[in-house]
Amino acid sequence: MAKPTDAQIFDASGDAAAQFARLVAIMECLRDPQTGCPWDIEQDFDSIAPYTIEEAHEVADAIARQAWGELEGELGDLALQVVYHAQMAAEAGHFDVAAVLRAINAKMVARHPHVFGDESRDKSPEQQTADWERIKAAERAGRAEGGALDGVALGLPALTRALKLQNRAARVGFDWPSTDEVLAKVVEEAGELVEARDHLGAAELAEEYGDLLFVMVNLGRHLGIDPEAALRAANGKFTRRFSYIEDELKARGKAPADSDLAEMDALWNAAKARGIK
C-alpha cells in the first residue's frame, strides 16, 4: 500500500468522505513502524479497547448534558477508535476499514427491508422492533449461534448486558408473568444477601450481591425502565446534592472532612427540600 501523501494528511477541505479518508491516512502514518508515533505503534487491540469504551461513554455523557459543542469532538474521538482498530486489523491481515464500512452498510440495508426493499413502511414501532429481532436471529443462526444468549457481548456494561440477557431469555418464554413475582424475588435475594453477610464468606456475599443486582435489572425491565439510564440519573442526582452539601459547608468555613454525618445528612435533606434532583 502506498504511503499517504502530505495532501491526504494536511488537507482540511473536502466533504465527509474526503475527511474520513484523511483520518484513515493519519492513522496509517501514526502506526508506521519506521516513522510513526512510538506510543501508537506499541498499542494493540487489548490496550485500545478500554479507550474505545471510554470514548463511547463520553459521547453518551455529552448527549445527556446536551453539550452539543462538545459532542462534535466526542464523536470524532469515537470515529478515531473505529479507524484505529481497523488499521491494526489491516496490519494483521484480518480486514481493513473498507471492509468494516461494507459490512455495516450491508447490515443496515438488510435490516431495513421496509426502507430499502419491497416491504411496507406501514408498521408500528413495535412491529419494526420485532422484525429487527427476527432478522438478527437469522443472522445469528447463520453464524452458528444456536443458543438464545449467544452473541451478547461480554464487554458491555454489566447492567446493560444483564438487560440484554434477560430480554433474550424472555423472548423464548423464560420470564416472570408480572412485576409481582419479580418483587418477591427481590425480597428473596435481599434475604439471602443478609444471610451471606451474617454467616458466609466474602465469595458467597459477592455472589448474593450480584444476584440482587441482576434481579433489580429484571425489575426495571418489567417496569419499562432502562437500569443503566436510571442509575446514571441517580448518580447525577447524588452528585448535585452532594455538591450542595459541599457549597453549604464551604459557606460555613468547613469541608466535608470537618463535618459529621448528622450535619451532612441535614444538608442532604435541605437539598431535597429545595428540589435539587
Image (spheres, grey):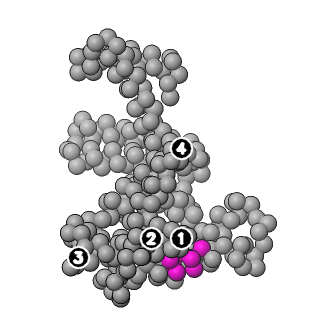
- Determine crowd level at label 1: few under 14, some 14-19, many 20+ residues with C-alpha closer than 10 A: few
Check disc 4 and report the residue beneath it.
66
Residue type at the position of mark 2: Asp
Q: Can residue 266 be seen in this view?
A: yes
How far apart are the alpha carbons under marks 4 and 1? 28 Å
State which mark lies toward you, 4 or 1: 1
Labelled disc at residue 186: none
Which one is in front, 18 or 212? 18
254 lies above or below 169? above
Which comes before the other along the chain, label 4 or label 2? 2
Residue 122: quarter of image: bottom right
CA gap, disc 3 to disc 2?
A: 20 Å
Dot 3: within a 10 Å radius of its alpha carbon, few (fewer than 14), some, or many (20 or more) residues? few
Q: Earlier in the sequence, mark 1 or mark 3?
A: 1
Residue 235: image x %, image y %?
A: 42, 37
Residue 266 in the image, given as x and y percentages of width and height: 38, 14
Residue at the disc numbered 3: 35
Q: How far apart are marks 1 and 3 (CA)?
A: 26 Å
Foreground of the two, 224 or 256? 256
Residue located at (34% from left, 22% from top) = 246
| Residue at the disc numbered 1 | 14
